[in-house]
Image (cartoon, rainbow, N blue to C red):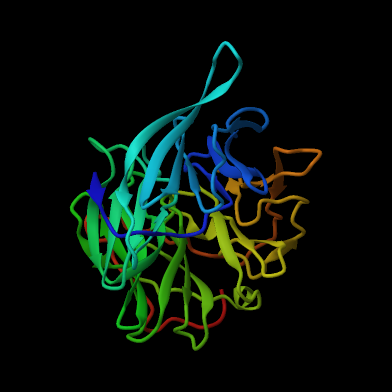
Amino acid sequence: MTVCAIEMTTTTAFTIAADGSYAARLAGEGDALYAERWTLAGPEAYAVPLPLAQPEEADSEVLPLADGRVLIHRRVAERHAFALLYPTGAEAGPSTGELQLGGVEAQEGVRVRLLPPCPAAAGAFALAAEDTVTTVWQVTGGPSGPRPVARIPGRCSGGVWLDRAGRLLALDRELEGITKAVAVDLGSGGVSPLLQITEDSDDRLLLADPDSGLLLIRSDAPGTARLGWGVLGSSLPVRFPECLARLGDARPFAVQPGQSLMPETCGVALRLPEGDIGLWRPADRRVFRLAAPTGWLGGSGLWSAQGRLHLPYATPEVPCGMVGLNLPLSPPPPVTPVAPEPATPTAPRPVPLQQAPLAGR
């Protein structure tokens, strides 16, 4: 058994696998909660409940894996336990199989949460953060049970994958009261700066697309916290479009893949403060506002490479549904695509912002 001090965070409502094949959430009502897996790869979405003899606690976390199993993270007495759930057949009807992965001891002062699904089949990872150091744990895909793969000085939050190999992970690290995004190489355990905007600004990475290198950033370098965008490995500064500044505390939750070397053409979906959806691409000077579908599992969605956004929803009439939206076309001004330089496996280049324009595109 691996020992670590951990305090659990709240669960994510709905999580989609990195390849878009499956999703998972805690379903049910009141105290009768259970893991539920959605299959998204077929002609239409369908859900498979994964209940066990004992209901799940509301603070449990679930994460879909590309092989169809669901990782669950539970607080059990003085331990944090990890297990894989999967549907299985039986003479009495469908049932749920469970494979225990081991766990870690719980102590005061450290928080843990599952990181977003890894783009590769390397496994699933968790983040355990305390005031002075943060540990990245590999929960699945290792030789036996959870194991630490990187230790980062400082308290880290966030978690964005920078490559499709599942090796480069961006974290928002707080040191001496200032938060900067750093890149962690899970192969070597090395840590390198990713966002270096000003010395005293808080610079967080919210979302990244490994295909185009597009980065969605929130920074207070312009004077107040604003959304901006840049390109991984580019020498150009981050830009802070005025159309994004008018959105307030909007949260990007999905970015269009498959736009290799064309970050300006990537569609970005944002959850707006009032609960609606904003659709935007860097080449545009406007954000398209759309009403969220009834029952939207807010903050989640999946772009196709063709530019269609798929949003999960659940209502009493349709307990498992996906609705598709197209990004409206608007004639953008002429732009010159910025080709990102390939990120090295050990030290992605920082995104500079010393002379960044605070308005415009």
Closest to the observer: 140 or 78?
78
Left or right: residue 33 compared with residue 86: right
Closest to the observer: 105 or 8?
105
Closest to the observer: 355 or 165?
165
Which quadrant would residue 172 be assigned to in this image? bottom left
Q: Residue at x 52, y 85 (%)?
A: 224
- The answer to whether residue 163 is seen in the rendering is no
Q: With respect to residue 235, does 305 lie above or below?
A: above
Q: Residue furthest top?
A: 91
The quadrant the N terminus occupies is top left
Q: Residue furthest front?
A: 77
Left or right: residue 117 compared with residue 293: left
Q: Residue at x 27, y 39 (%)?
A: 145
The quadrant the C terminus occupies is bottom right
Q: Residue furthest right?
A: 317
Residue 72, x across and y down, in percent? 46, 42
Residue 75, x across and y down, in percent? 43, 50
Q: Residue furthest bottom?
A: 223
Which quadrant would residue 95 be assigned to in this image? top right
Residue 221, x across and y down, in percent? 44, 84
The mark tally for this picture is: 0
Closest to the observer: 161 or 5?
5
Left or right: residue 285 compared with residue 225: right
Q: With respect to residue 3, does 42 lie above or below?
A: above
Q: Residue at x 35, y 74 (%)?
A: 180
- The answer to whether residue 294 is seen in the rendering is yes
Left or right: residue 111 compared with residue 311: left
Which quadrant would residue 310 be assigned to in this image? top right
Residue 67, x across and y down, in percent? 44, 30
